Amino acid sequence: MQEVNDTNKIQNDEEKEIDLLELATTLWKQRKKLAIWSVCGAIVGLVVAFSIPKEFATSVKLAPEATDSKSGGGSLGALASMAGFSMGASGGADAVYPQLYPDVVGSVPFTTSLFDVEVQTKTDGRKMTVRKYLEDETKGPWWGAVFGLPGQIIGLFKSKEEVSGNRKVDNFQLTMDENKLVEALRQRVTASVDQKTNVVTIDVKMQDPLVSAILADTVVARLQEYVTDYRTNKARHDLEYAIKLNEEAKASYYKAQQRYADYLDRNQGLAFHSAQTMRDRLENESALTFNLYNQTAQQVQRAQAKVQENTPVYAVVVPATVPIKADSPKKVMILAGFTFLAFVACAAWILFLAPLLAEQKLKSGSAGLLENRDASVSEKDK
């Protein structure tokens, strides 16, 4: 029984080798057609590669300040970090930890705040806002205009809402154009976080290298400002309240001191007990207000130190620089991809589609001959 199975296996392997040899032979016979299709695919790939506008990418890497050991869960956080996981802020009070930075960068308020950022083009040195650059200076491939032509024609017959040019962006309710700009910026401005090291990478893609670098630097500054404002929010409120109390205590102290000095000037040399009692009372009131003023001044100093303590520090590992080479399109990859697809399509046509169509055509021709034969036989019988 084992010998029979081995024999069948050998026969099947031989049949497979024969089939592959036949396929290779068929393709070799049609090598001219394969070459023509591959050349056509390469031409299409070149057209596509040179039709896509160049995109320049700028990457900035940030190393945020390490949080307190309590936020990492102590030894448990260290073990999770060794395993490639980050516990984030699960054990701490800081809600905006590095893993949430991509969501912050992609949020609507953060994205719309970039509309008014002033950038400068490298080609002609013109200055404009990011919104104007995206609307007027950003180009797309030619087929985008072709496929978008029906929508533009339909849009001519629709009534458009009149929007004032000085209209302030409402993050709660965006217009259609503002929403398109937000989506465009989300695709061009992205953030990612390394789960092991918590290094934040900001990537910005624009069709002008200088615009890309300027916007990347601005995004980093805005992100640092956002996180700093969040981390120091309570401390800054406490500082403002401490300064307010200190100003009130200062005013009270100056008034009490002035009343005490005025009383001494008016009652100098008097030996009445009532005058001495009033003098002691004003002196004690001045001392109390001074102590209160001194305490509030110390509170202001402590609040200032708390703000400084809560202010995060970022180490810019890779700063923003103006890119020299375009990041996309990958012309070699596009050319190779279209050439390979054309070769595969031609091979599929030669090996499968063409024989299938020939077989269907042969069957339909045989069926037609049989019908004609049956018709002629019936006529003779008549």
Image (cartoon, grey):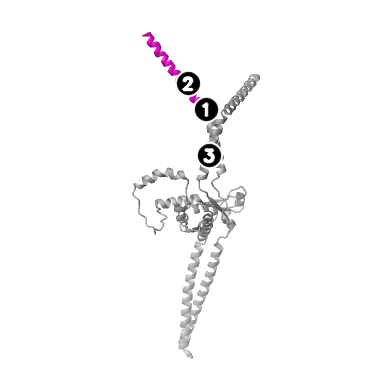
Is 364 rendered above or below residue 308? above
Instruction: Tell me where residue 302 sits by quadrant.
Output: bottom right
What's the amino acid at mark 1? Phe
**SS class of the residue under badge 3?**
helix
Viewer-proximal residue, 85 or 122? 122
The dot on residue 43 is 3
C-alpha distance separating marks 2 and 1: 15 Å
Which residue lies under the disc numbered 2? 362
Q: Which residues are magenta?
A: 355-382
Q: Is residue 61 magenta?
A: no
Contact (CB < 8 A) between labels 3 and 2?
Answer: no
Q: Amino acid at mark 2?
A: Leu
- How far apart are the two marked residues, 3 and 2, measured between alpha carbons? 35 Å
Q: Is residue 51 above or below residue 322?
A: above
Say which residue label 1 marks.
352
**Marks 3 and 1, how far apart in space?**
25 Å
